Image (spheres, rainbow, N blue to C red):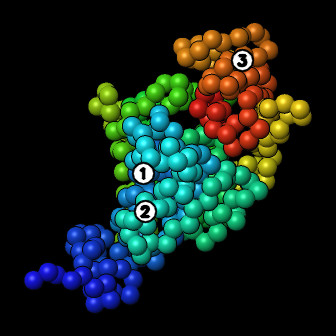
Amino acid sequence: MVACYDLSMESTDHYDAERFSRQVRYQPLGVAGQTRLADSHVAVVGCGALGSVTATALARAGVGSLTLIDRDVPEWSNLPRQLLFTEADIRAGIPKAEVAARRLREIDSRLTVTAHVADLTAANIARLLTGVALIVDGTDNFETRFLLNDFACQETIPWIYGGVIGAEGRVMTVLPGVTACLRCLVPEPPAAGSLPTCDTAGVIGPAVLVVGGVQAAEALKLLSGTAGPPASRLLVCDLWESVWRTVDLTPLADAGCDSCRRGDHPWLEGRSGGEPSILCGQDAVQFPPQAGTAADLASLANRLGELTDVVANPWLIRAQVEQGISLSVFADGRVIVTGTREPAKAKTIIARYVGT
Ligand SMILES: [Zn+2]
């Protein structure tokens, strides 16, 4: 006899009892936790490497509603680590958020998923993140993370920072007012060009799986409400060196910062992190300098020099980083991307090669 699976017979009001039986059996989660997952709404900001892992894990775990935000389309160099995308998606040129939403609906037809093909900015963040109980960071740049941090602090919404470069990963859970926030840990975004990025230093897929997995577990703990408040900690791991360590951030949490304790939200109010402008008569997008940060041209020139020819002088560096796309980074932190008139594409180029 063929077993006929009938959702209406097998489901509770909130979740499918058979489907999630192994999770419910895990006592720290239990029926109460699973029910809360089914009633939860989570935003995954950035649907690339980390976003693919976390969105898949949360959809499969029975989170009821997901909002996906991403500004890019999948590319060939994404396939080793961005699990939601295939060769066919690249040929079709469908934006990552849309592809991700389709895949997740195939995984769970009861999932409510909303895709936004958008660059998250101070102007749209309140609209795009309306009603979410938790934000998971899948971004690749500090400007968006500082914006997320400001929004989360203002709205008292938890968020989970994650980052991967090379084989190294970092995760920090932020519960505003309880734990340290991103600005407690990093008072200002790193200077343009001062840090490696996945496009200059490379990245391996397993590091993404680990960090995304830790982020997803942190999400389940927060959403289920059965794990107690999160600790103020930064997880740092290096899979190539087989090193894992946890940094205690309690002193930072006790002190707090202007964003999480004093209601100062410069990224949310647009005082930090400038808006791009399309240069008149050119195929180029210009980004103003971020407040208080100058570019580290020497460091950037060295790293880009390993990839391509770089023109460098005391005032700027210029490099053709991709076919038809040139990047000019000025000493004051201003950046011009030539070869496109699309701000979102230009931001992607900057996140890749400059890493702000
Ligand atoms: Zn803070």
Residue 284 lies left or right of residue 208; in this view the side is right
Label 2 and label 3: CA atoms lie apart by 40 Å
**Which residue type does callout 2 highlight?**
Leu
Residue 33 lies left or right of residue 179; in this view the side is left
Q: Quarter-wise, where is residue 246 in the image?
A: top left
Task: Please tell me the numbered disc located at residue 318.
Answer: 3
Kindly give the residue lying farthest to the bottom in the view shown: 9
**Which residue type does callout 3 highlight?**
Arg
Query: Does 97 sit above or below residue 284?
Result: below
Residue 312 lies left or right of residue 137; in this view the side is right
Label 2 and label 1: CA atoms lie apart by 9 Å
Q: Under tag 1, what secondary structure?
A: loop
| CA neighbours of label 1 inside 10 A, class few (<14), some (14 to 19), many (20+) | many
Query: Does 112 sit above or below residue 281?
Result: below
The residue beneath circle 2 is 104
Q: Under tag 2, what secondary structure?
A: helix
Disc 2 Cβ-to-ligand 1 distance below 8 Å:
no
272 or 318: nearer the eye?
Answer: 318
For marks 3 and 1, the one nearer the N-term is 1
**Which residue type does callout 1 highlight?**
Leu
Label 3 and label 1: CA atoms lie apart by 34 Å
For marks 2 and 3, the one nearer the N-term is 2
The residue beneath circle 1 is 84
